[in-house]
Amino acid sequence: MSYPEHLAYPAARYHGATGEVNAVFRPADTPPDISSPGATTHYLATGESTGGEFGLYKVDLGPRSAGAKTHFHKAMSESFYILSGELELYNGESWVTGRAGDFLYVPPGGLHVFKNVTDEPMSMLMLFSPGAPREEYFERVSEMSRRGGEELKQFRVRHDSYFVEDFEAGEE
């Protein structure tokens, strides 16, 4: 079976002949990097640690956790893999209920929303590609949301997060 050229392997980025020791292990019992009421976030692989290839985060949402409102990203894709519990996901067209083992891929520009509407906690993996410095966004989004206004909008845009509510007044 042959594949289209655009699906071919990328050019080599490692040019050694024997390989090297450079793998990174993160034990399951590593404490979360962020804890807030109703959520914890584990930085499994940051954009910095992967050389910008991807960012992978484990997010645990408590019961009835809001998640994020309708938004999109211009520079990266975002993927959701449900580990346990249920998560309501808006795929730009309709709501779907994600359960353990379900996966949602959102390409750049794709509208999406997520929230836990159940009385039970849930856990998911979130993958951003290419990797971006999402950690500051995760660490400061609650504070910036409390500030609101133009400061919140600029924070979101700086972190490639374009929320529909920021542009509802006809701005582009």
Image: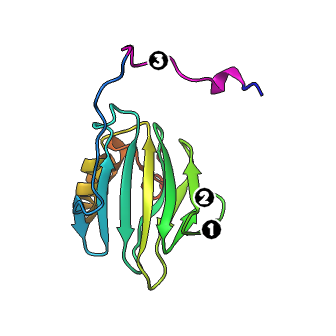
C-alpha distance separating marks 1 and 2: 7 Å
Q: Residue at x 23, y 60 (%)?
A: 30
Task: Looking at the picture, tell me which residue is in the foreground, 31 or 153.
Answer: 31
Q: Which residue is mark 2?
A: 91
Q: Nearer the viewer, mark 3 or mark 2?
A: 3
Type of amino acid at the residue the image marks with label 1: Val
Q: Secondary structure at mark 1?
A: strand
Q: Position of residue 108 (x, y in %)?
A: 53, 41
Q: Label 3, label 2: how many angstroms apart (C-alpha)?
A: 34 Å
Q: Which residue is mark 3?
A: 12
Q: Position of residue 49 (x, y in %)?
A: 28, 37
Which mark lies nearer to you, 1 or 3?
A: 3
Q: Which mark is residue 96?
A: 1
Can I make out residue 150 in this image? no
Q: Is residue 62 above or below residue 80?
A: below
> Badge 3: few (under 14), some or many (20 or more) residues near its Cα, within 10 Å?
few
Secondary structure under tag 3 reads loop
Q: Which residues are magenta?
A: 4-17
Farthest residue, direction right? 1
The answer to which of 147 and 113 lies nearer the viewer is 113
- Residue 5 falls within the magenta-colored stretch: yes
Q: Is residue 59 visible?
A: yes
Q: Amino acid at mark 2?
A: Asn
Comes first in the chain, label 3 or label 2 = 3
Q: Nearer the viewer, residue 18 or 142?
A: 18
On the picture, is 111 further left or further right than 38? right
Instruction: From the viewer's side, name the closer residue of 159 and 165.
Output: 159
Q: Residue at x 34, y 49 (%)?
A: 156
